[in-house]
Each structure stands twice: as C-alpha cells, then as structure tokens.
Image: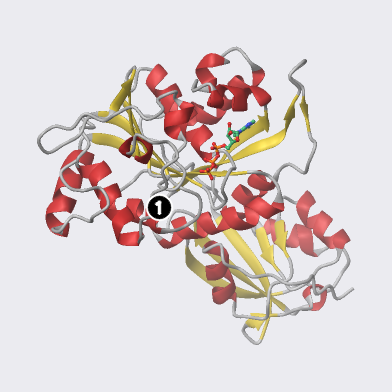
Amino acid sequence: MSECAAHPPVNPEEDQKKINARMAQVKHKICVLSGKGGVGKSTVAVNLATALADAGKQVGLLDIDIHGPSVPTMLGLGTTPLVSNADSVDPIHVGNLKVMSVGFLSQNEDEAFIWRGPMKMGVIKQFLGDVEWGELDYLIVDCPPGTGDEPLSICQLIEEPDGAVIVTTPQQVATVDVRKSLTFCNKLSMPVLGIVENMSGFACPKCGEVVEIFNTGGGEKMAADFRVPFLGKLPIDPAIGKACDAGLPFIQSHAATETAHMLREIIRPFLETDKPQPKETETMKIAIPTADGKLNLHFGHCAAFTLLDIDPGSKTITASTEIEAPPHEPGLLPPWLAERGVNLIIAGGMGQRAQSLFTAQNIEVIVGAPSETPETLVKAYMAGALETGTNACDH
Ligand SMILES: Nc1ncnc2c1ncn2[C@@H]1O[C@H](COP(=O)(O)OP(=O)(O)OP(=O)(O)O)[C@@H](O)[C@H]1O
C-alpha cells in the first residue's frame, strides 16, 4: 500500500478523490452490519458475496473487522501475502471474487492490531482507495460489530452506498443491540436493505427439520417495528460452522441442503434486481389519542385523536389533523380507526382485548408511550428512538 497501514494518510482531499475514482467503478456498495458480535455477520457477508460471484457478477469482499477479521479463514485464505504495485495493492482472487482483509496485513494469524480511531480510518481509506478493485458489480463490506469507528468511516468515505444488510439473532439480548445499528443507519441516512435473522431455530443434521429451541422472530419483529424489509431466517446448522472452519463458503459446499436453500432465498433480492432498493413500504397513518396537544394516557376515554400521515421514503410527517373521537362504545374504535386508514397507534396504555381487536384490523399498537406531542412521538418512532415504559392501561 502507498503508506504504512497504521498511519493515516496526510492529504484527506486527495485521498477522498482517489476513493471516489475507485468507487465510481463499483456499481453497488453494500455494508453488512450488526450491533452485536458473533451473530453471523461475516457468514452472511461471505455467502452473499460468493452467491453473487457464482451468479456471474464481479464482486469484491472487503473485511474491515480490524480486531477480528474472519473472512480469510472462512474462505480458506489464511495469511495469503499481498502483492503490492507502485501505488496500489492487488486483492486476493477467489474465482471472480476479489477479497481484501485486514487479516492479510500480517503473516501471523495471532497478531493483534492495536489501532486508535484515526489509524483505523487510515487503513479503511487505503482499502477503498489503494486496492485494485477494478470494475465491480458489487462491493460487500463486512464491518465489525457495533457502531464504532469502522462502520462510521465506511459510511463517511463511500459516497452514496446502496445501503446496509443488518444481521441479528432472534433473542432480545441481541435485538436490543442490533436496534442501535438501525438507529445508526437512520442517523447517517444509510438505507437499510433488510434484516437477516440468523441462528433462528436449529436445523436437525439428520432430517433437516428446523426446531425452535429458543424464541424466534426477534429480527422479523424488529424489521416490522422499523418498517424495513425482512430478508429471512437462517437456522443454526452445524454444517455452517464446519464449512466456515474448513474455509469453504457454505452456499457452495452444501448447495443442496435446506439451509443453503434458505440462504439463497435471503440473497435472492440482490440477484434479481440490478439495483438493490429498500422495498417500498406502505404509506403510513399513525393515530395518537390526544388532549391539550399531547398524548392522552386514557386511550379508551379520550375525546380526540391526532392522525398523522407519514411519507415512508423520507420518513417525514406530511399531514397532521386532530379529529373528535366517536362516542365511547366497546369495540367501536378499532373499525372506526381502520376506516380512516390508520395502520399504527401510539398509546400510553391499552387493555389486551382492545389490542387484539386492533390486530384483527391490521393495526399495529405501541403502548407505554409518554405524554408528549404527537410530532415528538412520531419523529422519535421514525428515528427508532421512541422510548416506551409500562402499559399505562386504564381498564
Ligand atoms: N446459522 C448458523 N449456524 C451455525 N453456525 C453459525 C451460523 N451462523 C454463524 N455461525 C458460526 O458462528 C460463528 C460466528 O459467525 P460469524 O463470524 O459470521 O459472526 P460475526 O457476527 O461476523 O462475528 P464477529 O462479531 O466476530 O464479527 C462462526 O463460527 C460461524 O461459523
């Protein structure tokens, strides 16, 4: 590479120009992110890149997990030495997949890189600007877990990335952290291409049947909460771990298995569309029970509702109207709000029976919201930052 990897380059404008010139040759740039470690992000990145390459696309796979690069191991590349040219470096070729990883920077797999934020930024700049990526259909970037320097650098250095694929496991302990990745994408205006729920159930090695040993559906729920596409579930399959350790992309080495089929389904949207777009989300109308301009905690007895229209693309409020509530009659509100096109209610509290009546009308309900103005609540919801407490049920 043109400079010592651990020292940031000195001319940021020149570096950015170089990066822009390289990235102009790459049609689609996709980051694979997760708020939590060990959830299968690199597994998804390696198999996504391999599947795209097998489909005849020109693909680059960039592993920027500085403290735990797993891509070289997963592709059986170990500490393959890099070939440097005068002012560039060649990626490692695996068929028509071009691979670059921080793991190739040392010949000792046990070496730990102790780099501070600016040094990490410097290395990532070099990976983007100095590597001979050539013309690519896809560059898949495997980021380290969390919302730290590396994903931030990638989002800042790549102009107009296509978006992020977010990987989670279904359990709440993971989704709590992974929700932060969604908020991170929102803050950086990075589109979310979809969520993958990995390690969702266990695929029996004998019959392939998926057994739900723990709770599942956490990733799917998160996708619904944030109104982003859900790409699918992948079970725990011991063959995935074995293939990773053997340095073989699972989607190739176990192509005929049910789990590989599920993986291909997850990846299919990227193969089918020339430009992966976040799926169109339906238009949204949110209803909030209000009194004196703020959320009224007494849902069943409120005198008015504020209805807010949301543009799903820009996530902005396009209209807001306060309407008088109908007379208090059991079971009347769900059809009354459904007729008005409402698909989400933000409330302080609500009884279980009322919640199921709304679910039957395809209206999602969020309870435990504080007594704030409708605009504050909706903005927080759209940013993935709506904090809810206990269900202040008034029944
Ligand atoms: N669905 C699965 N079934 C079985 N093993 C899996 C599955 N997904 C991932 N693994 C295994 O779990 C381990 C962690 O996966 P991986 O390295 O992809 O996670 P990660 O989120 O990238 O981790 P890190 O936090 O280190 O970046 C690997 O050994 C991998 O083979």
Task: Residue 213 in the image: state x and y as whole percent.
Answer: 80, 36
User: In the displayed structure, would residue 48 be above or below residue 278?
Assistant: above
Residue 268 visible in the shown view: yes
Q: Image quadrant of ligand 1?
A: top right
Q: Which of 166 and 114 is in front in this view?
A: 114
Instruction: Give neighbour class at mark 1: few <14, some 14-19, many 20+ (Cα, 10 Å).
Output: many
Task: Specify the quadrant that holds the N terminus.
Answer: top left
Q: Which of 232 and 180 is in front in this view?
A: 180
Task: Specify the quadrant that holds the C terminus.
Answer: bottom right
* Among the 4 quarters of the image, the one containing residue 23: top left
Q: Which residue lies furthest to the bottom in this view?
A: 292
Amino acid type of the residue tagged 1 in the rendering:
Pro
Q: Mark 1: which secondary structure?
A: helix
Q: Which of 132 and 26 is in front in this view?
A: 132
Q: For the residue with label 1, is its CB less than 8 Å from the closest atom of ligand 1? A: no
* Among the 4 quarters of the image, the one containing residue 87: top left
Residue 140 visible in the shown view: no
Query: Could you tell me which residue is drawn at 24 percent across and 32 percent down?
Result: 133
Q: Name the residue under label 1.
A: 151
Query: Could you tell me which residue is drawn at 54 percent across and 26 percent down?
Result: 244
Task: Residue 116 in the image: state x and y as whole percent.
Answer: 35, 60
Specify whether 4 is left or right of 186: left
